[in-house]
Image (cartoon, grey):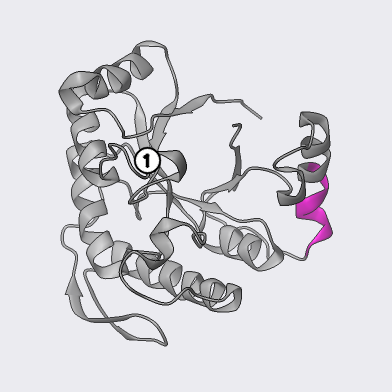
Amino acid sequence: MSLRLSTVILPYRRWHEGGRAAWERAEQLGFHAAYTYDHLSWRSFRDGPWFGAVPTLTAAAAVTERLRLGTLVTSPNFRHPVTLAKELISLDDISAGRITLGIGAGGTGFDATALGQEPWTPRERADRFAEFLALLDRLLTQDAVSYEGDFYAAHEARNIPGCVQRPRLPFAVAATGPRGLRLAAQYGQAWVTTGDPKLYENGTPEQSLRALRGRPTSWPMPAPRSDATLRSSTRCC
């Protein structure tokens, strides 16, 4: 097992006032990947500068050559699979195949009601994420998709020529419960975790590591797909 170090670059700097330099520096320091948060705003940054994830990653792709790039994480809170798929295919093309999509169910923060919707229940959020992920997988691997679901629809959505990375760009699926882990095993090339949510605020690193070691084996999961190995990606704050 190999250990790869990545970093997170928050999109609060103007591109020509430190934003560009941060992404270039990440590549110079030898990081495997650099991610940015895909939020409309985030915590204490809500009343300050905050820029969009996809435009930021597009600009980062233009000023780096080796560094992998991605979101940590995208969610259904303000995204739709059809439009997101088109953006991801374009971004994967511009970056010459260096994009990883970090994706999760989303939380209850500012993004959850920014479009005017009522807050989703935990059950609805989980149901939406499962449908979102399955449809996005199809959109990124098929030239034309039609679909009618409980929450999302696509009518003859075209995505030609598809991703540079085949069969599609990798998903890093954020999950903390049994259902999410099953989705990570089914669709993900990586699993994103911050450890046991109960330990997030006050737990020690040793407690989090013990929880991580025990979690995948204590919950029933399907066998990983034959085409890839599921990597674990631990976010350290």
Q: Quadrant of the C terminus?
A: top right
Image position of 188 with respect to 91: above or below: below
Which residue shows up at 26% across the image and 52% down it? 88
Position of 235 with respect to 96 (left or right) is right
Q: Residue at x 42, y 87 (%)?
A: 150
What SS does tag 1 mark?
A: strand
- Dominant SS type (magenta): helix
Q: Position of residue 104 (x, y in %)?
A: 50, 57
Viewer-proximal residue among 173 and 40: 40
Q: Amino acid at mark 1?
A: Gly
Q: Which residue lies under the disc numbered 1?
A: 70
Q: State yes or no: residue 21 in magenta.
A: no
- Visible in this render: residue 229? no
Count all numbered tags in the image, as a single digit. 1
Looking at the rendering, the stretch of residues picked out in magenta corresponds to: 213-219
In this view of the protein, which residue sits in the foreground, 231 or 83?
A: 83
Q: Could you tell me residue 76's position as x and y percent?
A: 40, 65
Q: Which residue is located at x 34 percent, y 64 percent?
A: 114
Please state which of residues 136 and 106 is positioned toward the viewer in this rendering.
Answer: 106
Q: Say which quarter of the image contains residue 132.
A: bottom left
